Amino acid sequence: MNVTELRNIYQLKISLNGARPPIWRRIMVSSSTQLEDLHIIFQICMGWMNTHLHQFVVDGVMYGEPDPDFGMDIQDEKGVRLSSLLKKEKDKMLYEYDFGDGWEHTVVLEKILPFDTKKQLPRCVTGRKACPPEDVGGIWGYEEFLEAFLDSEHPEHQAMKQWVGNYFSPDEFNKDEVNEILAEWSQS
């Protein structure tokens, strides 16, 4: 049995909980991807900056980077393969990023496909809407931010534009840019 027979391609959909309109990404990864790498893949695909703690939750079990000072019963994510947690189509897990802002993402295993050595993995297939800026205050803070950012008459409009810079557009998502970053990361 060769190595490619031991793994599949997982098509995952990552949706930011509470976002209206929805913010999501559809990605392809190897089923043998370890959680510590999946975290980085999610960061790249969603547009986060990897400056906060995170965890995966499956069947009530939390996986992440254990920290005895933090006081949570969390299993070490190192060495845990995605295929050991999501085993069949429609299986789900929670991915939480930034415990202060509480960005919760529902991750659904949409499809299990045969492994293909010609496919670049990981890869973002599609997505919708820009990721909220870091430290905006969670989904409620993002709603308030958008109200000020999109309304040129709002008293905080200029401050919000200055805070995020001219690059931010809530409706834009560039999968080609994401895939370039994923390719660079996977080759490093």
Image (cartoon, rainbow, N blue to C red):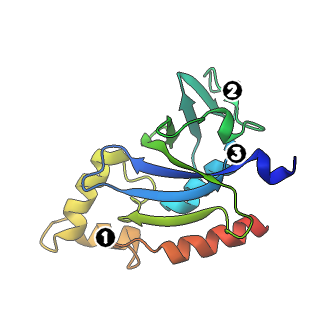
Q: Is residue 35 visible?
A: yes
- Residue 82 vs 62, above or below: the answer is below
Query: Which callout, 1 or 2, points at the residue further toward the start of the chain?
Result: 2
Which residue in the protein does label 2 denote? 75
Q: Dot 1 lies on which element?
A: loop
Residue shown at 62% from the left, 27% from the top? 70
- The residue lying toward the viewer, choosing from 130 and 112, is 112
Q: Out of 32 and 158, give the one closest to the viewer.
A: 32
Q: Answer with mark 1 or mark 3, whichever residue precedes in sequence.
A: 3
Residue drawn at x 64%, y 25% as measured from the top left: 74
Q: State if disc 3 and disc 1 touch (CB < 8 Å).
A: no
Is residue 48 visible in the rendered image? The answer is: no
Q: Amino acid at mark 3?
A: Glu
Q: Amino acid at mark 2?
A: Gln
Q: What is the CA distance from the residue labelled 2 to the residue labelled 3?
A: 12 Å
Q: Are marks 2 and 3 in contact (CB under 8 Å)?
A: no
